[in-house]
């Protein structure tokens, strides 16, 4: 009886500890490590490298050694998630598709969701495992699902980095485990984070604080987001943490308030408390000092462009995402205007090919420019279709 009482007491204490653990783990990180900054020079003082960017326009609010090549640790998974979201958009995979775990994927160390060789999960579940738990095994399983092998997927990552104009990024794997010739920069991470955020659905995963995998099994797996800001900073809904002994504590984070969404990246922070506090200060600074002026909202009609000899004679352009300019709070917006400058198009046209730019002015000063891409592919029309088009209604 005495032993039974002792066992019950130990079990009760363990249960209390499990209930309190998430709060206790954060208790030391909840308060800022430093006084809130009065100016930009005080932002992210403990970081090795940092950048603060407006997500809509790409305007840089603050940067510190932002082009230095550094190990990105698990922030690597921003590019992994970007390629997953693009594969979903293009219909190459679906959220409900099963993903099988190879022996190689299951062998990954570090952060993981403990996939067993041969175990299957859906793309949706794998995305949760990557976004919340930073699963190295889930990342490799998805890489193999999309490209066949991790090596081929890494080639896709590096090609996408080149397309985005990232000069200080090279990937050697899809999960950020330490590897030779694997590096990025705060600036490049902000750019790829901005691209990822164009897929609105991603914050459903990165902004989630907790969930379960294997819900219907005997051993449900509890996921808790490694980015505690999504719970403790109002408006935060992503994106990715990272840590290795070489990289130290890294974070690419995003938060939205009103019409303003910002991206903050810090690399080489000494601990999670300082990392989270300094990113919170960067957010506070942004929301106190700046506002966004909308040019187009997602889905707004932007105009049309003619396609010479195309099976479609013209393209209707619709805003794929929001277009806005960053202004200091209190700035006048009455003299802000825009011009859509499009290049003459001749079929064939490939989807996402650059076709011009949207230029935003304040008076005569250029505030920012946005690339405009072809919304769809347009094949070259056949001679009979072109002949009928030339003679108008004569053949109808």
Image (spheres, rainbow, N blue to C red):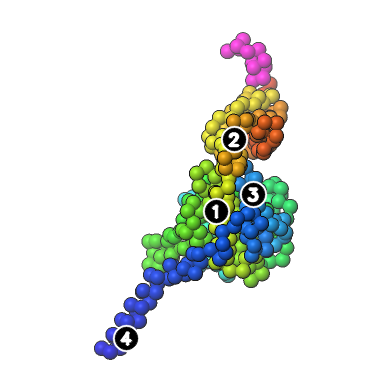
Q: Depth check: 232 or 173 in front?
A: 232
Discs 1, 4 touching: Cβ within 8 Å: no
Q: Which residue has dot 4 on it? A: 6
Instruction: Report how far apart the C-alphas of labels 3 and 2 lie in the structure.
Output: 19 Å
Q: Which residue has dot 2 on it? A: 332
As drawn, the residue found furthest toward the top would be 394
Q: Position of residue 328 (x, y in %)?
A: 60, 43
* Residue lying at 44% horizontally and 60% vertically, measured from the top left: 210
Secondary structure character of the magenta stretch overall: helix
Instruction: Report how far apart the C-alphas of labels 1 and 2 lie in the structure.
Output: 22 Å
As drawn, the residue found furthest toward the front would be 38
- Point out the tag, 3 or 2, that comes first from the N-terminus: 3
Helix, strand or loop at disc 1? helix
Helix, strand or loop at disc 4? helix
Q: Position of residue 314 (x, y in %)?
A: 62, 25
Name the disc covering residue 61, or none: 3
Q: How many marks?
A: 4
Left or right: 380 with respect to 199?
A: right
Asked whether 392 falls inside the magenta stretch, the response is yes
Discs 3, 2 touching: Cβ within 8 Å: no
Helix, strand or loop at disc 2? loop
Left or right: 257 with respect to 361?
A: left
The quadrant of the picture occupied by the N terminus is bottom left
Dot 1, how many residues are within 10 Å of its Cα: few (below 14), some (14-19), or many (20+)? some
* Residue lying at 54% horizontally and 45% vertically, measured from the top left: 260
Instruction: Report how far apart the C-alphas of labels 3 and 1 lie in the structure.
Output: 12 Å
Q: Which residue has dot 1 on it? A: 284
Instruction: Report how far apart the C-alphas of labels 1 and 4 lie in the structure.
Output: 50 Å
Instruction: Report how far apart the C-alphas of labels 4 and 2 lie in the structure.
Output: 71 Å
- Point out the tag, 1 or 2, that comes first from the N-terminus: 1
Q: Position of residue 279 (x, y in %)?
A: 57, 58
């Amino acid at each position: 009886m005495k032993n039974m009482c002792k066992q019950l007491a130990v079990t009760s204490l363990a249960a209390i500890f499990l209930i309190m653990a998430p709060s206790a783990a954060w208790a030391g990180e909840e308060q800022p490590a430093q006084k809130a900054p009065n100016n930009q020079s005080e932002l992210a003082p403990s970081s090795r490298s940092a950048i603060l960017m407006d997500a809509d326009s790409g305007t840089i609010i603050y940067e510190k050694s932002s082009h230095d090549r550094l190990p990105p640790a698990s922030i690597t998974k921003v590019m992994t998630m970007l390629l997953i979201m693009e594969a979903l958009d293009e219909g190459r995979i679906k959220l409900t598709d099963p993903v099988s775990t190879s022996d190689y994927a299951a062998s990954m160390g570090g952060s993981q969701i403990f996939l067993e060789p041969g175990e299957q999960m859906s793309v949706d579940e794998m995305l949760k495992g990557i976004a919340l738990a930073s699963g190295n095994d889930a990342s490799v399983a998805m890489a193999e699902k999309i490209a066949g092998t991790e090596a081929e997927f890494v080639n896709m990552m590096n090609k996408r980095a080149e397309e985005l104009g990232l000069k200080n990024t090279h990937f050697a794997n899809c999960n950020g485990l330490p590897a030779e010739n694997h590096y990025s920069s705060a600036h490049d991470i902000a750019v790829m984070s901005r691209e990822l955020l164009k897929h609105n659905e991603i914050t459903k995963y990165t902004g989630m604080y907790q969930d379960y995998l294997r819900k219907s099994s005997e051993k449900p797996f509890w996921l808790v987001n490694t980015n505690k800001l999504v719970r403790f900073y109002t408006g935060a809904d992503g994106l990715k943490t990272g840590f290795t002994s070489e990289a130290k504590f890294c974070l690419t984070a995003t938060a939205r308030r009103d019409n303003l969404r910002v991206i903050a990246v810090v690399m080489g922070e000494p601990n999670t408390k300082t990392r989270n506090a300094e990113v919170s200060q960067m957010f506070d600074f942004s929301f106190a000092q700046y506002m966004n002026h909308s040019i187009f909202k997602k889905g707004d009609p932007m105009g049309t462009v003619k396609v010479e000899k195309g099976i479609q004679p013209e393209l209707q352009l619709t805003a794929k995402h929001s277009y806005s300019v960053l202004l200091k709070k209190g700035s006048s917006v009455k003299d802000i205007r825009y011009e859509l400058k499009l290049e003459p198009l001749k079929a064939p046209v490939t989807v996402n090919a650059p076709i011009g730019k949207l230029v935003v002015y304040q008076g005569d000063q250029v505030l920012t420019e946005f690339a405009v891409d072809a919304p769809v592919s347009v094949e070259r029309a056949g001679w009979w279709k072109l002949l009928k088009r030339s003679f108008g209604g004569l053949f109808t």
